Image: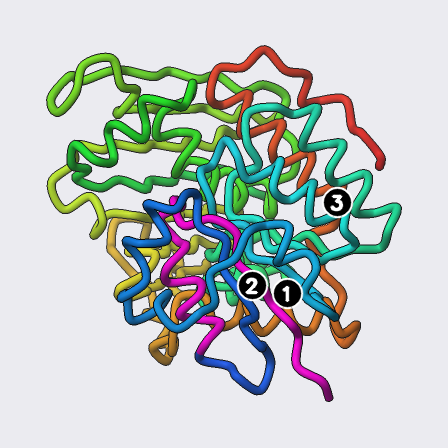
Amino acid sequence: MEKIKLGHIGTRHDHSRAKLEGAKKFPDLFEIVGIVPESPEVAEKIKNDKVYGDVPVMTEEELFHVPGLDAVLCEGYELDSVAAAQRCIDHGVHVHLDKPGGEDIAAYEHMLRDAKRKNLIVQLGYMYRYNPAVLYMHDLINDGRIGEITAIDTQMSTQHDMRVNKLLSGFKGGNMFWLGCHLIDLVYSVAGVPDEIIPMHNKSGFIMDGVLDNTFAVLKYPKFVATVRINSTEVNGYGRRQFVLCGREGTVEIKPLENPTKMTFADRRMTGTNAYNDVKAEIPFQKPTGRYDVMLHDFAAYIRGTKKNPFDYDYELQLQKMVLAACGFDIDFKTPTIL
């Protein structure tokens, strides 16, 4: 089977370098044909980098004229990447678009609509979709081991430095936009569209004034709420990154989400009638070979048609509406849009 000719646009996204490094691990799948840095200055800066350095630097126009170009990783600045993805779609090229899908919902919808019309893949860079614990959680849900949902609690916090705070200052939703999107994706995947989304955001000023660095959102469903907390000032916040799903039949706790992924499960058979003991089973997982490995394998499979992308265009549009609502945008996320 022929290799997928893969380009790379942008370097500003925090996942950019590791994503390209991941693709280079699979030379049987991908032929990396070129990278488009943001500027000549960036091109000069990356020329000796061990990941970027051996990839041909070119302009976007040159990349789109590479014979047989199949796909592009869009890894630039979060508010520029949707436009880059649109240009890829315009040139008939499949897209891996790193998360989230920008702040302009009309531009995002237009890009997805064009991609669907042209039968082009758009894969979003939500790596936790491919996390082994998250996949196992979906198995438990499908097997009826969780039951009717009664609560969802999520956190994705970190101690962020000045560099990240400057980045967050450019987003209306601050770190809810940058990190909360991951958790909202997981909530949506198990619970669907909520009745109401209530953002409750704060600016600590600890590192930089005016930055939404301590954010919280409530997603209200008919019988429960889901909470999403993102704190950029939390000591050992990474260790408390978690997704907790509670149902009438069982509870799943994934904490931390990665490095390492740890998961526990409890159901009524374990706890019996005693509600006052901590009774749960730890679910063992083999350490992933890389954060983006499964995602990139699936991207290749989607392009080759050997696997269907379970996150279709309508899903991605609905998700982005929910993300923007959690960031404080006045947006109708309840009326479905069928592309």
Residue count near mark 1 (Cα–Cα under 10 Å), binned few <14, some 14–19, many ≥20 = few
Q: Which amino acid does the dot numbered 3 rest on? A: Tyr
Q: Which residue is mark 2?
A: 140
The circle drawn on residue 143 is 1
184 and 291: which is toward the camera? 291
| Distance (Cα) linking label 1 and label 3 | 27 Å
169 vs 39, nearest the viewer: 39
In this rendering, the label closer to the viewer, 1 or 3: 3
Comes first in the chain, label 3 or label 2: 2
Label 1: which secondary element: loop
Q: Is residue 299 left or right of residue 241?
A: right
The quarter holding residue 32 reads bottom right
Q: Which residues are magenta?
A: 1-24
Q: Is residue 23 magenta?
A: yes
Q: CA distance from mark 2 to mark 1?
A: 5 Å
Question: Looking at the picture, how far across and down is residue 172, in whole percent?
Answer: 42, 18
| Residue hosting label 3 | 313
Q: Are marks 3 and 2 in contact (CB under 8 Å)?
A: no
